[in-house]
Image (cartoon, rainbow, N blue to C red):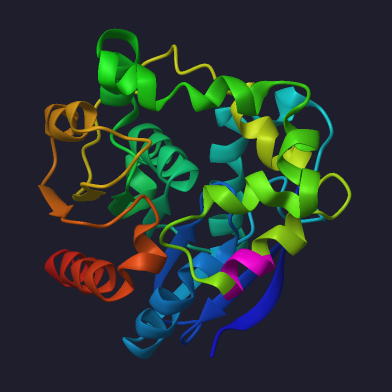
Amino acid sequence: MAEYIQIPTPAGKFDALTAGPEDGRPVLLLHGFPEAAVEWSEQLGVLGGAECFAVAPDQRGYSPGVRPEQVADYRMQELVGDVLAIADHFGWERFDLVGHDWGAAVAWSVAAEHPDRIRTLTAVSIPHLDAFTKAVREDEDQQQRSAYMQALRSSTAEKTLLADNAAKLRRIYYPGVPEHHVDDYVQRLTEPGALTGALNWYRASRFNEEIGPVTVPTLFVWSTEDVAVGSTAALATEQHVTGPYRFEMLQEVSHWIPEEAPDSLTRLLLQHLLAHAE
């Protein structure tokens, strides 16, 4: 069973779920939009049982204690800083980093900028950001897949998503996310300021600066039925990883890999951690 904790940092207190012994191998798991730490429930249990100390925080905007109002407070440099602040709180000199969706975007950035802190990287669904940015700029298929971002950046996004008992917000999770998780996410995002905080990740994003190559051992997991991310950037990611690299493609799985295919993802994650134990 995961344990609920709060993690104090200079930015505020992050809510988090943890599993496993505190002196175990540190693994930090970053959720995506529009989810929360709960998306890692299956992985937390297995990692904890494998003598890892797994920590999944509700990230900036999702944790009530770290919910700044300014869009600029959600720039990538702030999100990267949160990861390092959480690791510093636990005294982790090096740790394994796992991210899905926006959490993967942050994880790629942390690994590129601070390789000395990262033992391994596992990115789920979102390719290396330089490959993704190039695809958004040049690939018609990816441009169509990413068109939704403009709607999420609009000033009316909150009203649109929450109208009619959050009907459009709920539609985002289909198919792939279990209904009880959907109810949990929607309840969280109807809290004052929560959905605005989550949407500010999109409003603050620019994807116009290269992060450079990733040198740490990397596992990238992508799924063929991901409506948001096409194959162009997924296949190009290997060109941006100079360290040991493994690419896994899950067939007939949607964007919501951690919840739709938890057994497959957890198996791959454990193999990756074991292959790079030192």
Give the vertical position of 211 relative to 99 (above or below).
Answer: above
Along the horizontal axis of the image, is 83 left or right of 187?
left
Residue at 38%, 36% (x, y): give it: 228
Q: Is residue 182 magenta?
A: yes
Along the horizontal axis of the image, is 228 left or right of 141?
right
Give the vertical position of 156 relative to 68 (above or below).
Answer: above
Quadrant of the snapshot with the C terminus: bottom left
Q: Residue furthest right?
A: 192
- What percent of the width, then of the height, locates residue 275? 12, 67
The part of the chain drawn in magenta is: 180-184
- What percent of the width, then of the height, locates residue 156? 78, 25
Q: Main secondary structure of the magenta part?
A: helix
| Observer able to see residue 98 | yes
Residue at 67%, 79% (x, y): give it: 4
Residue at 76%, 47% (x, y): give it: 10
Query: Residue 155 sits in which quadrant?
Result: top right
Along the horizontal axis of the image, is 224 left or right of 127?
left
Q: How many marks?
A: 0
Near-viewer residue (156 or 242): 156
Query: Residue 145 sits in which quadrant?
Result: top left
Along the horizontal axis of the image, is 67 left or right of 152?
right
Near-viewer residue (228 or 19): 228
Near-viewer residue (155 or 266): 155
Give the vertical position of 175 relative to 236 (above or below).
Answer: below
